[in-house]
Amino acid sequence: MKIVLDTNAILYFLAGRLREPLPQAQFYISVITEIELLSYPLLSLEDEAEINDFLTDVTIIELTTEIKQATIKLRRKNRLKLPDAMIVATASHLKAELLTNDIKLLKIPDLPIRALQLIDN
């Protein structure tokens, strides 16, 4: 099984907020997710190390011509923000399920998308 993780799914995972463990799968992320994770201005050295450790366990998908074209179509059709469209396009290109808690992404038709159950804080 192939799974693309949205940025929020990774943040919930790293924070220990998932109600259930991630399923057994091959995990992928878009290059935009890597950028989002590592570009937070107040990121501590410990958090950066934890994120980099996590990134060694996933496959990072770079922006290809096919993903770029799918991103453009998704933005036009669904009025998505550029990072969200790139992440969805990556999942679509890989024919993978997308794990996200982004409400707008969960409403996109014709793509296997699943929300994560979180532990209440």
Image (cartoon, rainbow, N blue to C red):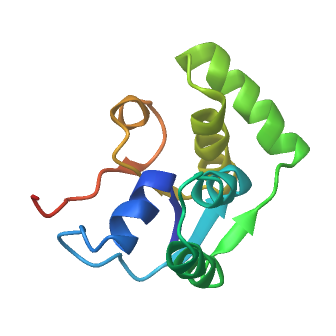
Residue in the foreground of this view, choosing between 11 and 98: 11
What's the residue at 41%, 62% (across, down)? 11
Which residue is located at x 42 percent, y 53 percent? Answer: 8
**At which x and y percent is residue 114?**
34, 52
Which residue is located at x 56 percent, y 16 percent? 79
Q: Is residue 6 visible?
A: no
Q: Quadrant of the C terminus?
A: bottom left
Examine the rendered structure and indicate whether residue 3 appears above or below residue 39. below
Horizontal side of 6 relative to 100 (left or right) equals right
Give the percent coordinates (x, y) of residue 26. Answer: 56, 78
Let me know if residue 69 appears in the view.
yes
**Could you tell me residue 67's position as x and y percent?**
78, 43
Residue 26 falls left or right of residue 103: right
Q: Along the line of sight, which residue is nearer the eye, 44 or 10?
A: 44
Labels in figure, total: 0
> In the current view of this chain or complex, which residue is farthest to the left?
120
When asked about the image quadrant of residue 103, the answer is top left
Q: Is residue 26 positioned above or below 100 on the image? A: below
Q: Residue at x 45, y 64 (%)?
A: 10
- Looking at the image, residue 114 sits to the left or right of residue 86; the answer is left
Viewer-closest of 54 and 95 = 54
Q: Position of residue 43 (x, y in %)?
A: 54, 62
Quick check: 44 left or right of 121?
A: right
| Extreme-right residue of the structure | 65
Q: Quadrant of residue 99?
A: bottom left
